[in-house]
Image (tube, coloured by chain):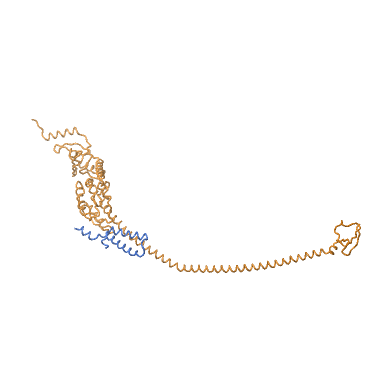
Chain colours: A blue, B orange
Amino acid sequence: MKEKITYEQAIKRIEEITRKVESGEMDIDSLAANLKEAKELINVCKEKLTKVENDVQKILEH
Amino acid sequence: MESLSLYELNNLVRRTLELTMCDEYWIHAEISELRINRHCYIEFAQKEQNGNGLIAKARGQIWANKWMILSQYFQQTTGQTLSPGMKVLVKVQVTFHELYGYSLNVVDIDPTYTLGDIARKRKEILEQLKAEGVDNMNKELQLPRLLQRIAVISAEGAAGYGDFCNQLENNKRKLAFFTKLFPAVMQGKDVEPTIIAALDKIASNLNRWDAVVIIRGGGATSDLSGFDTLELAENVAQFPLPIITGIGHERDFTVLDMIAHTRVKTPTAAAEFLIHHQEEELDYVEELAEKITQTTSNILFNEKKRLQLATNKLPSLFTNLKLREEAKMERLMAYMHNRMTQQIMKDKSHTELLEQQLTLLSRSLLDKEKNKLEVFENKIKNAAPERILQLGFTITRTNGKVVKDASSIKKGDVLDTTFANGTIKSIAE
């Protein structure tokens, strides 16, 4: 699922999780799950920023 | 029939001109063509007021030594070089040469006139765009968070594009960029058509690109007029992707610069702009990551602390409770104890009091009785006649009755006066 998400969607989701965690709405039990999701999304974003996915590369090659 | 040779005629024209028009004249005209090889050869023209037809034309030249001074002067003031399409104000000498004919020898120029003209043209174009309501369209586009796929419009093989790509490739935070060149002519009258063509090509598959960069390297001296055209401006204004212009011009803002999304000075500045935008994005992502880890660890830390606090408190709570209860008990005991002792004390003192009162009362009672008796006794004793007689009093009786009233005695009454130690008879005189 992660790869398909766009950069903008990923950022929005991370912002949402951060907001929830900061505002204390997050209970301890769901904290772990959300943290994991956030971490994954952060990696996705970083990857997109620093390594252009190869498919973009391919399209633009020819 | 007499006739002149061509040369003679031309010579005549020349001499007449030298006589009648020996002054220098300031003229304003448009440069239709311009060629430089040591000297500068210019074609001056004047268009009709409305249309594009010409109503006057003249050849002109600026000799090399003059050209060196004037071109530098012009460049310093306007930041551009003399080029076709410019309107200029020049001081000329009128010359006529038998072979080369009529030409204007340029001896001075007023660059501010050209500047004025350029500015006026730009203003007109801008107003036109404003009227069409498109002047801000490109500016209002939102730069996407991911600004990576850049369509570059620049001159084929120009230095600008090379510097631009190098800088993008080796940015220090390894941000990814992907560029493609859409070649166009960056100088003169072909600027407009070729850039528009490039824009069209880019527009043909828009979703491949995040933004367009129009850059021109190779110094800022060459002519900018090509970037000041209405049609090019309209195209850029309404282009669906943000356009960044780095035409490399220190002072001047061409119309293109004014309506593009972002204007930077040079191709390297354009690269820096993109890199900076992506660095901020990366910082933002890292900041979010930091914030989440920070807040979650805070939450965990606080929860643990709360738990710890609670567990720590338990024993003390318990002892407090115990102490409190014990204290209560003790207080209660003490209270009862002293209430009882108080009660006892009270009763005891009460009885003592009673006792004392009793003894006192009875004693005083007795005394009182005793006193009373004594008083009676005294009274009796005192009342005893003997005591009275002893005091010197005498009892007088007549006929055995006690006489109390002196007046009741008559002369001759016999009075018996009893004294303490006897009675004597006496006759009242």
Quadrant housing residue B9: top left
Closer to the camera in the image, B295 or B83: B295
> Which quadrant does the C terminus of chain B fall into?
bottom right
Extreme left residue here?
B1
Image vertical order of residue A25 relative to residue B197, above or below = below
Residue drawn at the location 30% of the way across and 57% of the way down: B281
- Is residue A44 among the parts visible in the rendering? yes
Residue A55 lies, in percent from the top left, at 22, 60
Image vertical order of residue B182 relative to residue B78, above or below = below
Quadrant housing residue B402: bottom right
Closer to the camera in the image, B343 or B327: B343
From the viewer's perspective, is B321 left or right of B380?
left
Residue B297 lies, in percent from the top left, at 37, 63
From the viewer's perspective, is B217 left or right of B335?
left
Residue B282 lies, in percent from the top left, at 30, 58
Closer to the camera in the image, A18 or B409: B409
From the viewer's perspective, is B174 left or right of B353?
left
Quadrant housing residue A60: bottom left
- Is residue B263 among the parts visible in the rendering? no
> Which quadrant does the N terminus of chain B fall into?
top left
Image vertical order of residue B235 relative to residue A21, above or below = above
Extreme top residue here?
B1
Residue B121 lies, in percent from the top left, at 24, 43
**What is the count of numbered marks?**
0
Residue drawn at the location 35% of the way across and 65% of the way down: A29
